[in-house]
């Protein structure tokens, strides 16, 4: 696997930004403020040196974060250096994408999917019931417009929430959460299509998302919708 096309890679970062980013040579370090690894990891943004890696680790410590890097799977030099630093591979992840045009061929059933901003209280409750805590919801607040909170309804009640943002022709979905009692009923697919219709209104041609390699159910759902693998990455971390 390799890193995704530049437009997808750029949207991947812009649509889920850290609270603060410091640059040390060729390494960028994110301050996550409790919002998870995506925003509290360090990553290569240019040619880097061993001193840059040392500085990144020091910044993690200054911020009270564990040592955590994120590397695309074709970045052999960085992966090797991190393993030599006793960083363990964590959460191998795929970036998947699909043409927006292929996802708007079916109308979303009435009152099933909505794209709104700001989020409703029920959407925040659904996120909080999953693994999308207030700090992660705060990431959404930082994202520049255009952006929308996805609301999914089934059996006459709100049962799903998600987030989508558009950056230079690519829309990225994040934080897609379905309440456990309403999973495997097709709601997630309709919410993805809702995001696609919203993306089309923004002029986006591509819809993308990240999914853990271990999440076979989600990967199968996205595959059935026509998503294909655009890139892959993993985290490399240690506790001190």
Image (cartoon, rainbow, N blue to C red):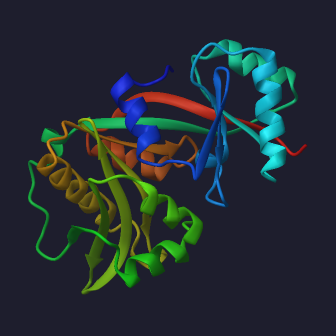
Please provide percent x and percent y for residue 202.
16, 48
137 sits left or right of 87 in the view: left
User: Which quarter of the figure has residue 107?
Assistant: bottom left
- Image point (67%, 61%), residue name: 34
Please provide percent x and percent y for residue 102.
15, 40
Residue closer to the observer: 168 or 155 = 168
What is the residue that sits farthest to the right in this orientation?
240
Please provide percent x and percent y for residue 143.
40, 54
Please provide percent x and percent y for residue 26.
64, 20
The relative height of residue 115 versus residue 96 in the rendered view (above or below) is below
The relative height of residue 21 versus residue 185 in the rendered view (above or below) is above
Residue closer to the observer: 204 or 107 = 204
173 sits left or right of 156 in the view: right
User: Which quarter of the figure has residue 193?
Assistant: bottom left
134 sits left or right of 193 in the view: right
- Image point (78%, 51%), residue name: 63
Quarter of the image containing the C terminus?
A: top right
86 sits left or right of 94 in the view: right
The relative height of residue 146 versus residue 86 in the rendered view (above or below) is below
- Image point (53%, 49%), residue name: 215
- Image point (15%, 53%), residue name: 197
């Amino acid at each position: 696997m390799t890193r995704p096309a530049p437009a997808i890679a750029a949207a991947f970062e812009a649509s889920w930004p850290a609270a603060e980013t410091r640059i040390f040579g060729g390494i960028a370090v994110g301050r996550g403020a409790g919002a998870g690894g995506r925003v509290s990891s360090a990553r290569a943004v240019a040619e880097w040196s061993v001193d840059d890696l040392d500085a990144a680790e020091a910044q993690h410590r200054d911020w009270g974060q564990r040592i955590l890097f994120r590397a695309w799977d074709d970045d052999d030099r960085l992966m090797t250096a991190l393993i030599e630093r006793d960083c363990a591979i964590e959460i191998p992840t795929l970036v998947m994408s699909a043409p927006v045009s292929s996802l708007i061929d079916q109308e979303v059933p009435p009152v099933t999917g909505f794209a709104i901003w700001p989020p409703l209280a029920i959407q925040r409750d659904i996120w909080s019931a999953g693994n999308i805590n207030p700090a992660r919801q705060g990431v959404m607040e930082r994202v520049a417009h255009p952006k929308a909170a996805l609301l999914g309804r089934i059996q006459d009640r709100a049962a799903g929430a998600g987030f989508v943002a558009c950056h230079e022709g690519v829309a990225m979905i994040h934080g897609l959460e379905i309440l456990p009692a309403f999973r495997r009923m097709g709601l997630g697919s309709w919410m993805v299509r809702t995001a696609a219709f919203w993306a089309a209104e923004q002029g986006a041609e591509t819809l993308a998302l990240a999914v853990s390699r271990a999440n076979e159910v989600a990967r199968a759902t996205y595959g059935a919708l026509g998503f294909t693998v655009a890139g892959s990455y993993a985290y490399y971390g240690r506790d001190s």
